[in-house]
Amino acid sequence: MAPNTQPEIVDTPIDSIPHWYSPEDDSISINDGSGAYVYDEDGTEYLDFLSQLYCVNAGHNEERIIEKITEQLQQIPYVSSAKKNETRTEFARRLTDIAPESLSDVMFSISGSEANETAIQIAREYTGSQKVLTRWRSYHGSTYGAASLTGDPETRATVERHAAVTGAAKFLPPMIHRSPFDGDTPEEIGQQAADHLEFVIRNEGPDSIAAILTEPVAGTSGAYPAPPGYFERVRELCNKYDILLISDEVIAGFGRCGDWFGIQTEGVEPDMITFAKGVTSAYVPLAGVLASDEIGSWLKETGFELGQTFAGHPVGCAAGLGALDVYEDELIENVQLLEDEFQNELKKIEERYEAVGSVHGRGFLWSVEFTDPETGEPFVDPRIEDSENPVKQVREIAAENGVLFGSGRPDIQVLLSPPLCINSDKINKAISVLDSAINEIFE
């Protein structure tokens, strides 16, 4: 760094540097949690309606997961990722039991970024092709490989300042609200979006494309589901052009969208699924790839020359076994029972405020997107404007009133992604706080 660019040294208390860190923002210190609530260093209670990072699906302090972790620690705390382990094997079998029928094999990793990179490495080796198609505005991780897949320009530009990332091309997402397509119905928009995807495939060259990687329901880019029929057409295109379909379930999986995996709410069988976050309810880092029988058999025959020390950590697999029990016993059913109520309460906010341009989502993953009613555009686009963001102010007021919500990419929306253990009272409380915050800022 040149001398004239050296930052001023500031004497601050020793602390870890948060991820997604901005010097202008204060981060609360969360030190305790139970169920859908977390508590800061002063004991202030917050209803955690973002599950921390869209991942604590079973809620905080779930004893059934903690018991599994404790048992594994007492048995053996770590086994090399190059070796077999009974807990790891049992968990892999449980995962294939709940996955779409076409998926029969598991390769573990550590984080969602690494799971996506592993899936892409497998896809490129398996097909002999290089390119991967992903949605514009998508988020698939911020490591170098995953950032190349990410369609969010802010993330990709940050990584590309010092090293180019290659091998990925982008296609437009099939959003209904503020869609890049002009269909009059969701079905028409879905058809146009699929036609556009086929154009991109043909333009890039089908033989050069290894896979299409996409979230079944968008995560931090806006919680938007695809229009009816879209994913059936995507599956047809993949079959037509011999391209693998990879469903990124890092956020959408493990009950978040009302089924084990988000792609199951579309009735489509992918070639691979990537997972992380909710697989252990975030109690222990764990991620991985579910692959079809054809891909799994090929991997077993040819081998795989890469690996990660902590992939498939036994304590993580034990946590995953506990989490699957909790999801299976009650939590996925709870999402199914409360999804309509959740949606209906949010739709009331959409009807009440002109500043709310759209409410969209599925299961327990929803976005409240804000647009200027006079222009139909965001009040502030933080990607290109450096001014006070009213949407951020809504979240700040909500936090002051005891409810934590998430931000999206771009930050023109409030994301609601609570633990799957919430009930009607907590839905009503959170949405009431959101309503009051919107009213304070926009009315």
Image (cartoon, rainbow, N blue to C red):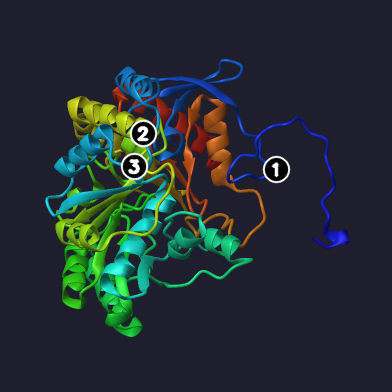
User: Mark 3 = which residue?
Assistant: 365
Q: Evaluate if marks 1 and 3 touch, with contact meaning CB atoms under 8 Å apart.
A: no
Of label 1 and label 3, which has the lower sequence position? 1
Q: Amino acid at mark 3?
A: Leu
Snapshot quadrant of residue 442: top right
Q: Amino acid at mark 1?
A: Glu
Mark-to-mark CA distance, 3 and 2: 24 Å
Identify which residue is drawn at 59% across, 56% down: 382
- Left or right relative to 165: residue 212: left
Identify which residue is drawn at 19% across, 59% down: 228
User: Mark 2 = which residue?
Assistant: 316
Residue 361 in the image: state x and y as whole percent.
31, 47
Nearer the observer, 38 or 228:
38
Question: SS for tag 2?
Answer: helix
- Observer-side mark, 3 or 2, equals 2
In this view, which residue lies farthest toward the top? 43
Visible in this render: residue 24? yes
Visible in this render: residue 341? no
Q: Amino acid at mark 2?
A: Gly
Residue 258 in the image: state x and y as whole percent.
22, 40
Question: SS for tag 1?
Answer: loop
* Above or below 203: residue 415: above
Of label 3 and label 2, which has the lower sequence position? 2
User: Mark 1 = which residue?
Assistant: 24
- Observer-side mark, 2 or 1, equals 2
Residue 220 in the image: state x and y as whole percent.
43, 49
